[in-house]
Image (cartoon, coloured by chain):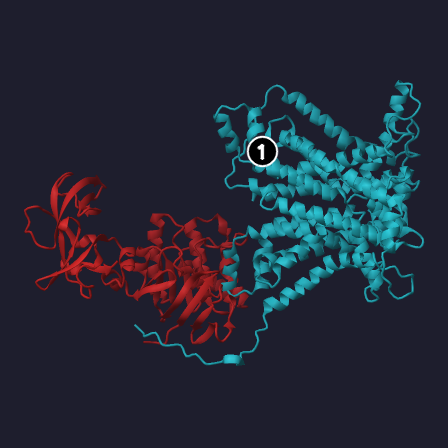
């Protein structure tokens, strides 16, 4: 056996060159890049709220904007109040959604998969087309339901008025809050191990007792997490309040910000002060949420080798199923049917035997403004989805697998836009672009819209990718490295192909999110870059509601096709 | 001896406060199979990963073919892809989105080998591991044993300087494991591949290696040929980890020039091991079961005999397992089928004094 030779140790003492670490340089670069996208716009908003110069003057700082917007303006104060009042729908909806999801997923209701699919469609439907549909039902003057009630009961005024807090709540809850939570709670309910319930049954509990003592306590954290997340998300809302709230003088903070900025001349400092104030509150809620959801929520109920068996139910499953069917018909089918009808009406809202026409379709489809918007929408959505998928995958890979410097800080910054409603993200980027001469060339370009939309979906996209990468065995990558491939080749040839189902899902999600977005882009849009969703909002807010309905049908149809495709893909993902 | 292919010197690697690899040094010569053997957590896999370039050492140096690939003090770290080593994991790590052929061709394509040559090589290496005809199969449609051979083919295809095998047989069932072990041995002697092998299975270690390094708590306890590890273990740990041992605790006693260990019940066991502590010191004596025979009580009352009682006789098909109690210790011995004793019988265990080892406690 060869003797182990002593290792010659050259005394290099202080002569060692400082090691320029790749991890350090790359880490700082990524950190700077992510911070530019997420933190800098926020900082610009905060600083901007104290910047009270008149145009052309050097920067002067003061609290005037804060005073005039928050203390002296009753409209701004009431907007903040309404925002949080309306956000209270989230906890209520979470409870409703939990029971609905439980019925759909854990019982053997007849046609439960159709009902689930209807919620899936509702999940993807943009809010604005649905709002238009509801206007046709609940408008105080021409609403179908009001007219119907009036023909039966001798009433003076309308029974329902959609231009009210109740109307706004109704549209939000039925079109978004409940369907979203049903879909989000689905995985948690599916992953609840049936053997937990079976053991309780074997101990002699009735199904109701099992639900009370076993299922509900186990799932409660997931519901609470959904409620908190929904509360934060519901502060995103903009277009529903813009269409339904403004005519009644009801403002939320987001429509108020839009108001201040579209003022002539724009009241930037006041808008920034209001933004900063809301941001502060949101950060507090988000931190509470983060504290609470850590190690709880959806993750706690996941387990391996989960067996799942829907509960057999008694005779009451038929009425329960009928009830759900009715609910779905009212919530999803009715507004869509009304919207389609509205697009063919001579005058929006006026029903009659000879009141239908295709002239709006012909006009809109030949309108160059519309055609430009279609092109813009496609460019923006495709651009956002492509760039987003690439960026999220790359970032997620670095966060999960590398030893980059400052990874945890990057993680926080990536998560930051999750707490920032679209309109605040928009105002931040707008201010950043306007106040920087180098960046001002970006103003009025499609690129800036793609950029802000990519940032908007950065948290969810990166997070989903991180989960997906975490599920790829580390040894699959290490084998590639040992075989002679560098990290980028490994990423391209091993990691990306293995996460293809997730890439496709995120592409679809980002595409649809960009297609339907209003609040994030509205402050950055110019007539030449205007997408369909914004065009629709402009038509809906003016008197061109027939045209808005036509565009609404098109957007809703696209969203539904994508929902179908996504479901197919989702099923594929589940099969893998 | 020829210049070693792999030189590992003074390697340290810690995770937090845990020292996973502690001052490990060894050489690996061309065509040699060296096995790192030890229980889980002994640092054998970490050592392998340090050689592969998947971990960076805190201290020490690694050289492959004379080239320094890792040196803590000289701040050199060559990443895995530039070391030209091959690695097979316990989990196979066969890429599920590629066919058998694509898996094996991957390292060759990375090296920009012409397509025709890649095809030729893939075919050759697949026939080497008995996978001809499965080229087009998706890798995940294969059995565990076949996947393991794909991983092996992939690692052999580019003729790496060293083949690193990390518990390659542990995921296979017992029968397949035995088959693969024999095949691996034949393959190695045919190709003369230099292999660094990691396992916790002593049979694999014994039968496949030219030398074995028994590791414990991050350190190499003994590095020697398999026969030496078994016959002349350097520590009680090595002896008890490799093969079966019968163990007694007792006190050293010297009488009339002979050395004894006094066990419980004042039984004395003569031993010939040298270098023992002074009289009265506690020691642990160990002996291999095959160096012990069961004799009737009437046998000569030699000092290397222990009185014992047969507690139970367990039928195991081709042999009996015999539970015996001797000097307050429960032992398990294999007995032939034509064993003349039964439960309750008083017997004598005859121990060859030259085969008994004694270790300070």
Would residue A340 be visible to someone looking at this image?
Answer: no
Label 1, secondary structure: give it: helix
Within 10 Å of disc 1 (Cα), the crowding (few <14, some 14-19, many 20+) is few
Specify whether B284 is left or right of B82.
Answer: left
Q: Quadrant of the C terminus of chain B?
A: bottom left
Q: Quadrant of the N terminus of chain B?
A: bottom left
| Relative side of B186 to B120, left or right | left
Q: From the viewer's side, name the closer residue of A371 and A324.
A: A324
The quadrant holding residue B164 is bottom left
Q: Chain of mark 1?
A: A
Q: Is residue A538 visible?
A: yes
Q: Is A277 left, or right, of B108 in this rendering?
A: right
Name the residue carrying label 1: A217
What is the x, y in percent for residue A85?
78, 38
Q: How many marks?
A: 1
Q: Nearer the viewer, residue A377 or A131?
A: A131
Looking at the picture, does residue B100 appear above or below residue A179?
Answer: below
Out of A185 and A245, give the one closest to the viewer: A245
The structure residue drawn at horizontal position 61% and vertical position 52%, both measured from the top left corner, is A466
Residue at x 61%, y 60% (from the top left corner): A407
Question: What x and y, as percent, mark residue B264?
Answer: 17, 50
Identified at 44% across, 67% down, the residue is: B160
Q: Quadrant of residue A558?
A: top right
* Chain A painted colour: cyan
Report which colour depicts chain B. Answer: red
Where does residue A349 sit, x and y in percent of width and height?
Answer: 90, 32
Q: Is residue A430 left or right of residue A97?
A: right
Q: Give the answer, above or below, for where A412 lies relative to A243.
A: below
Residue B342 in picture, x, y percent from top left: 14, 39
């Amino acid at each position: 056996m060869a003797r182990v030779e002593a290792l010659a140790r050259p005394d290099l003492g202080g002569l060692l060159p400082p090691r320029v670490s790749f991890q350090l340089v790359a880490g700082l670069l990524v950190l700077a890049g992510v911070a530019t996208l997420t933190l800098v716009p926020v900082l610009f908003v905060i600083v901007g709220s104290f910047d009270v110069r008149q145009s052309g003057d050097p920067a002067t700082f003061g609290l005037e904007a804060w005073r005039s917007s928050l203390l002296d303006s009753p409209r701004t104060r009431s907007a903040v109040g309404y925002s949080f009042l309306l956000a209270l729908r989230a906890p209520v909806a979470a409870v409703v959604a939990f029971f609905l999801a439980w019925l759909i997923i854990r019982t053997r209701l007849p046609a439960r998969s159709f009902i689930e699919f209807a919620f899936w469609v509702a999940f993807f439907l943009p809010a604005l087309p649905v709002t238009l549909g509801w206007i046709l039902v609940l408008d105080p003057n021409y609403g179908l339901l009001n007219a119907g009630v009036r023909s039966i009961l001798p009433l003076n005024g309308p029974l329902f008025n959609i231009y009210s807090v109740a109307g706004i709540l109704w549209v939000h809850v039925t079109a978004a809050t409940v369907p979203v939570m049903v879909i989000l709670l689905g995985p948690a309910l599916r992953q609840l191990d049936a053997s937990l319930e079976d053991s309780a049954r074997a101990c002699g509990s009735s199904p109701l007792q099992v639900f009370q003592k076993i299922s509900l306590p186990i799932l409660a954290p997931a519901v609470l997490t959904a409620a908190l997340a929904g509360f934060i998300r519901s502060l995103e809302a903009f277009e529903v309040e813009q269409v339904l709230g403004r005519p009644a003088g009801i403002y939320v903070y987001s429509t108020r910000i839009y108001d201040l900025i579209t003022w002539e001349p724009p009241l930037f400092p006041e808008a920034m002060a209001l933004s900063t104030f809301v941001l502060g509150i949101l950060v507090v809620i988000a931190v509470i949420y983060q504290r609470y959801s850590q190690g709880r929520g959806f993750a706690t109920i996941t387990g391996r080798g989960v067996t799942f068996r829907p509960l057999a139910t008694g005779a009451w499953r038929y009425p329960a199923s009928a009830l759900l069917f009715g609910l779905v018909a009212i919530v999803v089918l009715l507004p869509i049917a009304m919207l389609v009808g509205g697009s063919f009406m001579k005058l929006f809202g006026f029903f009659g035997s000879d009141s239908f026409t295709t002239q709006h379709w012909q006009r809109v489809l030949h309108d160059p403004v519309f055609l430009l918007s279609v092109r813009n929408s496609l460019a923006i959505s495709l651009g956002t989805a492509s760039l987003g998928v690439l960026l999220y995958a790359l970032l997620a890979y670095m966060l999960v697998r590398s030893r980059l410097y400052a990874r945890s800080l990057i993680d926080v910054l990536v998560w930051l836009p999750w707490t920032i409603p679209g309109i605040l993200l928009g105002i931040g980027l707008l201010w950043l672009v306007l106040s920087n001469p180098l960046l001002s060339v970006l103003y009025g370009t499609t690129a800036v819209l793609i950029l802000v939309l990519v940032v908007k979906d950065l948290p969810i996209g990166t997070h989903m990718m991180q989960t997906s990468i975490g599920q790829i065995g580390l040894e699959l990558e290490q084998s590639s490295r040992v075989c002679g491939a560098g990290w980028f080749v490994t990423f391209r040839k091993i990691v990306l192909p293995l996460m293809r189902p997730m890439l496709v899902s995120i592409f679809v999600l980002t595409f649809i999110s960009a297609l339907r977005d209003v609040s994030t882009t509205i402050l950055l849009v110019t007539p030449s870059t205007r997408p369909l969703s914004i065009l629709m909002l402009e038509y809906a807010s003016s008197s061109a509601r027939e045209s808005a309905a036509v565009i609404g049908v098109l957007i809703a149809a696209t969203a539904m096709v994508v929902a179908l495709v996504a479901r197919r893909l989702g099923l594929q993902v589940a099969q893998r | 001896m020829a210049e070693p292919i792999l030189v590992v010197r003074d390697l340290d690697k810690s995770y937090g406060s845990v020292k996973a690899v502690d001052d490990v040094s060894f050489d690996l010569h061309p065509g040699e199979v060296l096995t790192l053997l030890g229980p889980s957590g002994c640092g054998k896999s970490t050592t392998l990963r340090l050689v592969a370039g998947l971990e960076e050492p805190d201290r020490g140096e690694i050289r492959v073919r004379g080239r320094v690939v890792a040196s803590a003090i000289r701040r050199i770290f060559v990443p895995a892809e530039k070391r030209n080593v091959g690695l097979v994991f316990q989990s196979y790590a066969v890429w599920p989105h590629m066919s058998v052929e694509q898996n094996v061709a991957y390292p060759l394509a990375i090296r920009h080998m012409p397509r025709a040559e890649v095809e030729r090589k893939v075919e050759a290496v697949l026939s080497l591991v008995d996978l001809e005809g499965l080229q087009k199969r998706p890798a995940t449609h294969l059995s565990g044993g076949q996947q393991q051979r794909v991983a092996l083919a992939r690692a052999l295809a580019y003729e790496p300087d060293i083949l690193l095998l990390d518990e390659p047989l542990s995921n296979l069932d017992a029968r397949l494991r035995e088959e693969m072990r024999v095949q691996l041995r034949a393959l190695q002697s045919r190709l003369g591949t230099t292999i660094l092998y990691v396992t916790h299975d002593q049979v694999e270690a014994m039968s496949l290696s030219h030398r074995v390094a028994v590791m414990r708590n991050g350190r190499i306890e003994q590095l020697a040929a398999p026969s030496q590890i078994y016959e002349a273990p350097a520590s009680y740990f090595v002896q008890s980890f490799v093969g079966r041992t019968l163990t007694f605790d007792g006190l050293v006693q010297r009488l009339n020039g002979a050395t004894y260990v006094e066990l419980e019940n004042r039984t004395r066991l003569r031993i010939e091991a040298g270098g023992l502590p002074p009289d009265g010191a506690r020691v642990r004596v160990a002996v291999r079961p095959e160096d012990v025979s069961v004799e009737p009580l009437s046998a000569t009352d030699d000092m290397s005999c222990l009185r014992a009682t047969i507690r139970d006789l367990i039928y195991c098909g081709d042999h009996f397992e015999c539970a015996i109690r001797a000097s307050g210790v429960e032992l398990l011995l294999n007995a032939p089928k034509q064993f003349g004793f039964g439960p309750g019988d008083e017997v004598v265990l005859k121990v060859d004094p030259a085969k008994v080892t004694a270790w300070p406690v």
